[in-house]
C-alpha cells in the first residue's frame, strides 16, 4: 500500500479513494504517544451541524454570551473602525455575528469571508449580498491557519482601513505556538492602524467549564465521537464508536479544556491497511480549548505586534472581545 496514491487498498482487496491529507494526519496522529487527532477534522457536514447544536445547549455559554456582548459594544466598535472599512472574517460560519457587525458599521466598503468550505462560503455570500447590496463581497476559499492571498481589489486598496473579525473564540483551539503564527499571518494582511476584533473565552470556574463540554444531552459527546464515524466513512476504517467514550475535563495547569476519546477495551483498529492497537483506558486526544485571562491575551497580542486598544467582557466575565490595532 502506498500513501502517495489517491487510492488505498483495503484488506478485502477493494480500493478506496481518500483525502490524502486527512489520511496522513490521522495516521500520523495515531502513531504518536499519546494518540491524537487534529480537531479541524471534527467539521464535516454532520460535525458542523453538531457544533451548531452545541452552541444552542444550555451549558455552552460561549455563543449566546458573545452575541449579547457584541450587541452591547457595536456602537463603540463602529467608532473605532470608522467609515468605508474593508472587513475580513476568518471562518465565516453561519453569519449571525457578521450581519450585526456589518449593519452597525458606517458604510463598510467590502466583506471578505474566508472559509475552508466553498459551499458554506457561497451560501453565506449570496445571502449577505441580498441583505447588504451596497457592500462588495469577495469570498476566499482558504484555511485560516495558512497565509491568505487576498483578492486583488482589496490588496490594492491602501486608503481604507481593514478590520479582521475572528469571533467565537476559535483562537482557543490553537496551541500557544499556533496563536503566534496565526497573529503573524493576520498582521501580514494589515497596515499599521488596521484592526483585529477577536472573541476570546475566559478562565472561569472549572465546574462551569466542565459542564459546557459535558452537556447533559450528550451533544458534545456525539460531536467528539463523530470524528471516528468520519474516519470510518472517508478512510474506510473500522472504529467501533461504542468502544470509545467522550471524556472532557478542565486542566487548570494548562488553562485548557482537553477532549479525549477513551478506549473502553483492548482493541485493534485498521485504517487503510495499517493497524493501531489500543489498550483499555488509552485515550485519543482530540481537542484543546484554551481559556485566557484578559491580561494574558493582551500580553500575547502586544508581543505579536498589536496594540491592545480596547477590551470588553460580559457582566459575569465569562467571555471577552478585544480590539487590537496593528502597530
Ligand atoms: C470552535 N471552538 C471554539 C469550540 C470550543 O469551545 O473550543 C469547539 C468545541 N469543542 C467542544 N465544544 C465546542
Image (cartoon, rainbow, N blue to C red):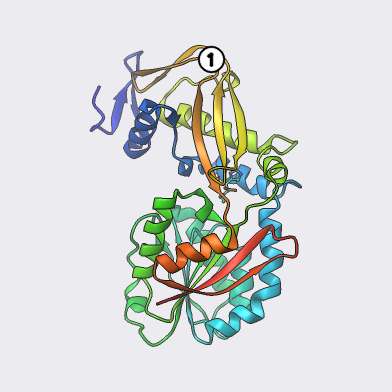
> Seen in the image, is 167 located left or right of residue 270?
right
The quarter of the rendered structure image containing the C terminus is bottom left
Residue of label 1: 280
Residue 223, position as x, y percentages in the image:
60, 37
In this figure, what is the number of numbered marks? 1
Q: Residue at x 72, y 45 (%)?
A: 208
Residue 155, position as x, y percentages in the image:
33, 76
Image quarter of residue 181: bottom left
**Is 234 rendered above or below residue 83?**
above
**Is 181 rendered above or below residue 236?**
below
- The one nearer the camera, 186 or 53, is 186
Can residue 115 be seen here?
yes
Residue 33, position as x, y percentages in the image:
40, 26
> Seen in the image, is 230 located left or right of residue 216?
left
The quarter of the rendered structure image containing the N terminus is top left
Q: Residue at x 69, y 71 (%)?
A: 71
Image quarter of residue 74: bottom right
> Seen in the image, is 6 located left or right of residue 260?
left
- The one nearer the camera, 145 or 4, is 145
Image quarter of residue 263: top right
**Is 64 rendered above or below residue 155?**
above
Mark 1 falls on what kind of element? loop
**Is 5 rendered above or below residue 256?**
above
Amino acid at each position: 500500500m502506498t500513501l502517495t496514491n489517491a487510492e488505498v487498498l483495503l484488506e478485502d482487496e477493494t480500493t478506496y479513494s481518500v483525502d490524502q491529507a486527512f489520511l496522513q494526519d490521522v495516521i500520523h496522529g495515531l502513531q504518536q504517544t499519546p494518540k491524537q487527532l487534529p480537531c479541524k477534522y471534527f467539521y464535516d457536514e454532520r460535525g458542523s451541524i453538531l457544533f451548531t447544536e452545541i452552541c444552542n445547549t444550555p451549558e455552552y455559554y460561549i455563543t449566546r454570551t458573545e452575541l449579547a456582548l457584541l450587541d452591547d459594544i457595536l456602537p463603540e466598535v463602529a467608532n473605532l473602525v470608522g467609515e468605508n472599512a474593508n472587513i475580513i472574517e476568518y471562518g465565516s460560519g453561519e453569519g449571525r455575528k457578521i450581519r450585526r457587525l456589518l449593519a452597525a458599521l458606517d458604510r463598510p466598503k467590502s466583506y471578505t469571508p474566508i472559509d475552508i468550505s466553498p459551499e458554506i462560503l457561497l451560501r453565506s455570500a449570496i445571502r449577505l449580498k441580498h441583505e447588504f447590496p451596497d457592500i462588495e463581497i469577495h469570498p476566499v476559499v482558504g484555511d485560516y491557519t495558512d497565509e491568505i492571498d487576498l483578492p486583488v481589489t482589496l490588496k490594492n486598496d491602501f486608503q481604507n482601513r481593514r478590520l479582521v473579525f475572528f469571533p467565537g473564540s476559535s483562537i482557543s483551539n490553537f496551541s500557544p505556538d499556533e496563536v503566534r503564527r496565526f497573529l503573524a499571518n493576520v498582521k501580514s494582511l494589515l497596515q499599521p492602524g488596521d484592526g483585529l476584533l477577536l472573541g476570546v473565552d475566559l478562565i472561569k470556574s472549572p465546574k462551569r467549564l466542565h459542564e459546557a463540554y459535558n452537556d447533559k444531552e450528550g451533544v458534545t459527546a456525539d460531536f467528539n465521537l463523530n470524528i471516528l464515524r468520519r474516519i470510518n466513512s472517508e478512510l474506510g476504517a473500522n472504529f467501533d464508536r461504542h468502544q470509545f467514550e467522550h471524556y472532557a475535563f478542565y486542566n487548570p495547569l494548562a488553562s485548557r479544556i482537553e477532549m479525549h476519546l477513551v478506549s473502553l477495551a483492548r482493541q485493534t483498529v485498521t485504517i487503510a491497511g495499517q493497524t493501531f492497537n489500543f489498550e483499555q483506558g488509552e485515550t485519543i486526544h482530540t481537542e484543546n480549548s484554551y481559556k485566557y485571562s484578559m491580561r494574558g491575551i493582551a500580553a500575547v497580542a502586544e508581543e505579536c505586534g498589536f496594540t491592545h486598544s480596547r477590551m470588553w467582557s460580559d457582566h459575569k466575565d465569562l467571555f471577552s472581545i478585544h480590539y487590537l490595532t496593528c502597530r
